[in-house]
Image (tube, rainbow, N blue to C red):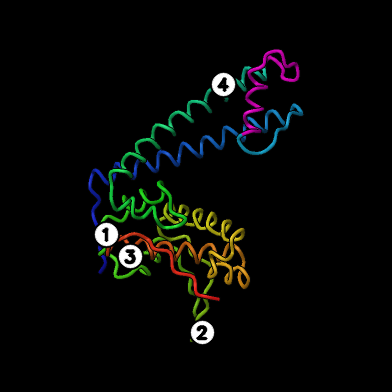
Amino acid sequence: MRFVAVKSAEQQGQLMQHRTRDLLMRQRTQVINALRAHLAELGIVAAQGREGLKDLLAIIADEKDERVPVDARASLIVLAAQLQALQTLIGSIEKRIIAQHRANEASKRLQSIPGIGIIGASAIVSTVTDPNAFRSGRDLAAWIGLVPRQDSTGGKQKLGPISKQGDRYLRRILVVGAHSVLRRAKHNPQKYPWLTQLLARRPFKVVAIALANKMARIAWALLASGGRYRAPRLAAA
């Protein structure tokens, strides 16, 4: 039988910060989408990203702009104030996470892995307090849910997409980090030969899952044996 390790109160508190930040970020996205949708109904559309949002907030704050009716502006001002409050709350939680990351040697070592930033490193360290609970990095990747689902019948093994089991938060962080690395690999293929070869044969999202799996295995190796990530030397052409 396999048993689940009991989390300490400190570990639960650190993970609670990540979950709270994740909730606030989803709420921020909902408010931004609401602002864009309401203004689009009035024929006011801005570009995607922060600059476009900044333009929309300026229109809401400008009482001389006659494109926005009085009643609509009253509602939009409330949403803009809620967005500002969410930004402040997210920033306060991120400051605590960054401070804890800088005080944790294991978390700083995990940050050296490409695709794992401060949030990812802090989340992995807070979740995986005892790397020896896993026999290998493969077990950790399977526990997170970064392995294909097996559909076997008639003695034939068929590997399908990844399952939805495992730690969804860690899986999402690793997959997002993998996407970031893949975008850099497209612009600098010489630095990432393994990823370049995979991208030539497999779809982008399949390669992202494979890279996230590799990142989880590397993270386990650093937690179990210590040290920092060292990029493999490129073979001579």
Q: Mark 3 or mark 2: which is in front?
A: 3
Q: CA distance from mark 2 to mark 1?
A: 32 Å
Question: Sequence order check: which comes first, mark 1 or mark 4?
Answer: 1
Circle 1 Cα neighbour tier, 10 Å, few/some/many (<14 / 14–19 / ≥20): few
Q: Nearer the viewer, residue 163 or 120?
A: 120
Q: Residues within 10 Å of mark 4 (few under 14, many from 20)?
A: few
On the image, which quarter does residue 137 sit in? bottom left
Most common SS among magenta residues: helix
Q: Label 1, on which residue?
A: 4
Counting from the top left corner in percent of width and height, residue 27 is at 51, 36
Name the kind of residue labelled 1 in the image.
Val
Name which of mark 2 and mark 4 comes first in the sequence.
4
Residue type (three-letter) at the residue carrying disc 4: Val
Disc ID at residue 156: 2
Q: Is residue 168 magenta?
A: no
Vertical arrangement, residue 219 with respect to residue 55, above or below: below
Which residue is drawn at the image coordinates 58% and 62% (left, top)?
A: 205
Would you say 130 lies left or right of 63 here? left
**Residue range (magenta):** 51-70
Q: Secondary structure at mark 4?
A: helix
Q: Quadrant of the C terminus?
A: bottom right
| Marks 2/4: CA–CA distance | 59 Å
In the picture, measured across the screen, residue 150 lies left or right of residue 68, that is: left
